[in-house]
Amino acid sequence: MSQLGILYRHIRTLNGSMIDLLATPQQLPDWPLHLVKERLSASYHGDFEHWLSAINSLPVTAPQHHLYDDTISAELACDQSTLQAIERALLQLHPWRKGPFRIGDLYIDTEWRSDWKWQRLRRTLGDLSGQRVLDIGCSNGYFGWRALQAGAAEVIGIDPTILFCMQHHALQKFFDDKRNWVLPIKVEELPTSVQFDLTLSMGVLYHRRNPMQHIQHLFDLTTAGGRCILETLVVTAAESLYPSDRYARMRNVWCVPSTAQVLQWMQRAGFEHVQIIDVSATTTDEQRRTEWMRFDSLSDCLDQDDSSLTVEGHPAPVRAMYMGSRRS
């Protein structure tokens, strides 16, 4: 591919249906296409054909208007039976973690009120006009649409969870916005030649065995003069927490750092002007079980007699947002 790249569409034939997989954004040379092709396939994930069938069952509609506000919305002119068909199809892509969304009169009440987190972030972001954004651990791309609302020129979301990529593809049936991408790759698989004006890492750090390495990846992917936003679980105590088994019933939490530890890590990676822009306790109003996410949620992970503790006896979830810049 050329340095400028082209808008590449990878067309696969699966079960007699054509799926248009958004594969390469315009300005990503050396993109690992082979990984995208490998992972968006029935041989990679046993549920892929089921999810693909649900997407292909979505009625053909023509959205009249898009709104990338707190609730990402597509206005549709359709009857109740069509709306019910859309609901049945999208529920096949359960669980829906990040949102909310509205398709016509159908409200997708996701587990997370991601709009609350965006509101905390938006106060600091300012105008993103013309900027290219990388969203690591992007889920179904909710924050990508919000970044477009703030003026971003293009958002590249990466998330190794195939279901989230399929949710994004389903939503693109209604939004069809080629400026927002969700691709099934990991941050360490990105070519080092790729850099972004704004790099987001929201809710990823505590899942990494080597958090310093992750922050170094963030620095390397942020262009000179660009910014990085990192959001993570933290403890307000002086010492970081290293759970021996689970944290809030999650197996893959390796470190819940102290607020000061994250500042030190970001500075050590090379970021300048590092600051904490928000610290908020996660509430059961912000993260909860809904019709669109029927598994255990935050209320099931807290001590029933003391909500300031998890069921394991650790401090209940508190999340901090950090911002740092890379020298021009």
Image (cartoon, rainbow, N blue to C red):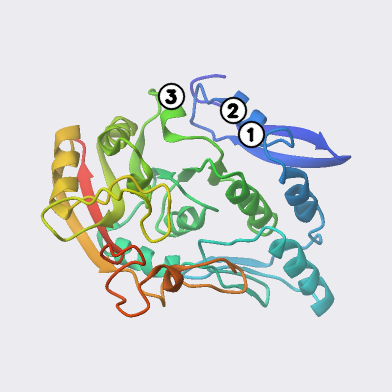
Q: Residues within 10 Å of mark 2 (few under 14, many from 20)?
A: some
Q: Which residue is mark 1?
A: 39
Location of mark 2 (residue): 35
Quadrant of the rendered image containing residue 226: top left
How far, Cα to Cα, is label 1 from label 3? 18 Å
Which residue is painted at 74% across and 37% down in the image? 42
Separation of marks 3 and 2 at Cα, in angstroms? 13 Å
Q: Residue at x 68, y 54 (%)?
A: 170
Residue nearest the observer in this picture, 38 or 241? 241
The image's mark for residue 191 is 3
Q: Are marks 2 and 1 in contact (CB under 8 Å)?
A: yes
Please identify the quarter of the rendering in which residue 205 is found.
top left
Mark 1: secondary structure: helix
In front of the other: label 1 or label 3?
Answer: 1
Q: Position of residue 255 (x, y in %)?
A: 28, 47
As helix, strand or loop, the secondary structure at mark 3 comes to loop
Report whether residue 328 is seen: no
Q: Amino acid at mark 3?
A: Pro
83 sits to left or right of 45:
right
Which badge, 1 or 3, is on the more N-terminal residue?
1
Residue at 29% x, 67% y is 316
Q: In what quadrant of the picture does the C terminus appear?
A: top left
Q: Nearer the viewer, mark 3 or mark 2?
A: 2
